[in-house]
Amino acid sequence: MSALDLFLIKLKWNSQGLIPVIVQDFEKLDVLMMAWMDKEALRRTLKQKEMVFWSRSRKEYWHKGATSGNVMSVVDFSLDCDGDALLFKVKMSGSQVACHTGVRSCFFQKM
C-alpha cells in the first residue's frame, strides 16, 4: 500500500465520500475559500500540486484556475485533529481572486 493510500484511510469522509477543504494563502494567511474533495480530487491535487475540487452541484472535478487563470499552487497541507477536514496553504497566480464572485476571498460578507 502506498503512503497516499495509507493517508486516505486516515481521513474521515462524509456519507457522500467527501471531505471539506479550507484554502489559505500561505503568505498573507487569509482564508480564501472552502470547497470539497473526494479521494480522486485529492489524488489529482497532490499529483498536479494545484488545487482540484469536486463540484457537488455540477458533479464534476474542477481544477481551480483552469478557466480564470487564478491557479492555486499547493505549498503545504495538513489534516485537522479529528481527520475530517483538510487545510491547504497555496500560492495564488493570476489576479489573486479565489472567489467566483470576483473578489479575493469567499469570506467577504461581514455579519
Image (cartoon, grey):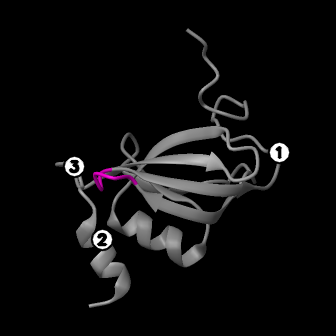
- What is the secondary structure assignment of the residue under circle 2? helix
Q: How many neighbours does mark 1 have within 10 angstroms: few (below 14), some (14-19), or many (20 or more)?
A: few
In screen coordinates, is 74 left or right of 91?
A: left
Q: Disc 1 vs disc 3: which is toward the camera?
A: 3
Q: Residue at x 21, y 50 (%)?
A: 16
Q: Disc 1 vs disc 2: which is toward the camera?
A: 2
Q: Position of residue 68 (x, y in %)?
A: 72, 49
- What is the secondary structure assignment of the residue under circle 1? loop
**For the residues marked 1 and 3, what is the alpha-carbon distance in whole angstroms?**
33 Å
Task: Name the N-terminal-most of marks 1 and 3.
Answer: 3
Q: Which residue is mark 1?
A: 95
Q: Which residue is mark 3?
A: 14
Residue range corresponding to the magenta coloring:
80-84
**For the residues marked 1 and 2, what is the alpha-carbon distance in whole angstroms?**
33 Å
- Is 86 colored magenta in this rendering? no
Q: Position of residue 67 (x, y in %)?
A: 68, 53
The amino acid marked with disc number 1 is Ser
The amino acid marked with disc number 2 is Leu
Q: How many neighbours does mark 2 have within 10 angstroms: few (below 14), some (14-19), or many (20 or more)?
A: some
Q: Are marks 2 and 3 in contact (CB under 8 Å)?
A: no
The amino acid marked with disc number 3 is Asn
Q: Residue at x 68, y 44 (%)?
A: 29
Toward which corner of the image does residue 93 lie, by quadrant? Answer: bottom right
